[in-house]
Amino acid sequence: MENILNFISVNQQIIYIVILMVFVGIEVIGRVPSVLHTPLMSGANAIHGVVVIGAIIIMGRAEADNYLALVLGFLAVVLGTLNVVGGFVVTDRMLEMFKKKK
Amino acid sequence: MGFNLLTICYLIGSITFILGLKMLSNPATARKGNLIAATGMVIAIAGTIFLYEQGGKKLHNYTWIFLGLAIGTLIGTLAAKKVKMTAMPEMVSLFNGMGGACAALISLVEFNHISKSLEPQTLDISAIQPTVLIIVLGLIIGSVSFAGSMIAWGKLNGKLKDFSFTGQNILNLLILAVALSAGAYLVYNPAQHFLLYSILILALVYGVLFVMPIGGADMPVVISLLNSFTGVAAACGGFLYDNKVMLTGGILVGAAGTLLTILMCKAMNRSLQNVLIGSFGGNKTGAVLTNGKDQGSYKEISLADAAMVMSYAKKVMVVPGYGLAVAQAQHVCHELEKILLDKGVEVKYAIHPVAGRMPGHMNVLLAEADVSYDNLLEMEQANDEFKTCDVVLILGANDVVNPAAKNDPTSPIYGMPILEVEQAKTVIVNKRSMKPGYAGIENDLFFQPKTSMLFGDAKKVLQDLCAEVKIV
């Protein structure tokens, strides 16, 4: 019990961020028209590619003899970058088509 | 100094993500919103590479980092640029899976890292327990998202078929329960390394079995759900490194993705539970029956007749569906629209919210073919206008125009809002065959006196129709 309370008080900043972000996330897309569902999903998909930062930190911290971290970290950087770049480019391609042509 | 600058970078990143999502939910600003979020992402990533330090030490292994970034960027850009518009949904699923895998890999490495630091002094387990918990959560969610997205990708591009067996739901829950309890035990006793790999395997298996029985038309909902899973997995990473931009980005997507999933379900008038447990795809017995009543016969119409009817109509409403997307017929559809327009026929499009493979899919497809945004009517608008239409041309849509959703309480799609095309004077249905649509039920509409069928691949039929209309 004390552990849990301790955990909460140590990490209270993070817990606040999580709670507020949940509401922000719900609020910002609350009134999206259904035509934008697919691009929005794709855009959100690109944003969670931010996980690549974790992969970069792993790679950057890995000692030269820590092959597990090096190999998996490298793989993670590649996959994360794919998520980010592919996600944003695909979204842009979808949205490019929405612009009105006169 | 450098590290403080990094904080600013992350702050900018978080703000652009929120702004980007906000702008993405409005047609006028969507494209800019995407660019803004992308810019924020570049700032956050570049900041991490050059400014991150831990205990006064900067990052190293730059060669490998940049190589990884370059490979990812190259493949990502090529794949995203080359993919056909009809294949967008599976592309999103694939990229989502990559993110999930990335999160799972991070968890694997970090656990290894932490268990190494544990070896010399086994005294204070309680200090690392929260970290292990986050690692386990990130691993499970990331792996489920990865495996699920891969299956969704395979199913959408037709490589995998639906697959289900009795008791599958129970087995799924069992696997999930075992994985979670193994995770809980690992948190309790972090020295049991092998458990981590069992959890990884169980989570992957769960991801596969979870998506396997869900039918093609429900894939958008599943992808959206997995998308929000990956968001949460990314947030776990943010917790691990006390990294605010990962945390905010991840949770933001987790929350927005969950809401988006619910909105998509609402558009189909179904609950999320219903989609996941799958009464649609699984229930094959009720599908073949048509309430025992004879449907009567349908009538076909020749291309020339169809062209004639449409040329002399005042107003034609096109109802595009899955068949249009599969046949890639959007351009020739616009072609037909132009030809009819030259003949003084008013042409509009009625877009059901879940027509195609993803909500909004039809809009993207038609926009690609330069169909004006103003001519696309949403369901309510379209339902008001059907009365005034002379001809409704249905292109590969089926369940979204099935009147059973309104009149037949025993129908599995009862209650789903539909396009009420039977209010128009004539209905022409283009389909490849009389095979039922995704829901596996017969469509009374096809047997109504005012309906005539025009069989064939949508693209081929539309091309021929264009030629016929020209010479009328």
Image (cartoon, helix red, strand yellow):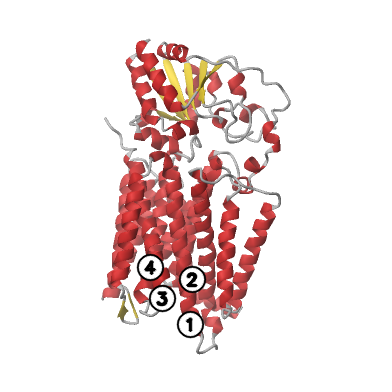
Find disc 4 in the rendering and name its residue. A74
Q: Which chain carries label 4?
A: A
Q: Nearer the viewer, mark 4 or mark 2?
A: 4
Q: What residue do we see at 40% from left, 59% from top?
A: A49
Q: Nearer the viewer, residue B123 or B323?
A: B323
Q: From mark 3 to mark 4, how far is it between C-alphas?
A: 10 Å
Find disc 1 in the rendering and name its residue. B116
Q: From mark 1 to mark 2, how far is it between C-alphas?
A: 13 Å
User: Of the residues under marks 3 and 4, which one precedes in the sequence?
Assistant: 3
Q: Contact (CB < 8 A) between labels 1 and 2? A: no
- Residue A33, relative to residue B152: is it above or below? above
The amino acid on which the numbered mark 4 sits, given as a three-letter code, is Phe
Q: What residue do we see at 70% from left, 32% from top?
A: B410
Q: Mark 3 lies on which chain?
A: A
Q: Is B80 displayed left or right of B322 in the figure?
A: left
User: Of the residues under marks 1 and 2, which one precedes in the sequence?
Assistant: 2
Q: Which of marks 3 and 2 is in front?
A: 3
Viewport quadrant of the N terminus of chain B: bottom left
Q: Mark 1 lies on which chain?
A: B
Residue B470 is drawn in which quadrant? top left
The amino acid on which the numbered mark 2 sits, given as a three-letter code, is Leu
- Which label was assigned to residue B108? 2
Q: Is A46 displayed left or right of B2 in the figure?
A: right
Q: Nearer the viewer, residue B162 or B139?
A: B162
The amino acid on which the numbered mark 1 sits, given as a three-letter code, is Lys
* Mark 2, other Cα within 10 Å: few <14 / some 14–19 / many ≥20: many
Secondary element at tag 4 = helix
The amino acid on which the numbered mark 3 sits, given as a three-letter code, is Tyr
Q: Is B461 displayed left or right of B435 in the figure?
A: left
Find disc 3 in the rendering and name its residue. A67
Q: Which chain carries label 2?
A: B
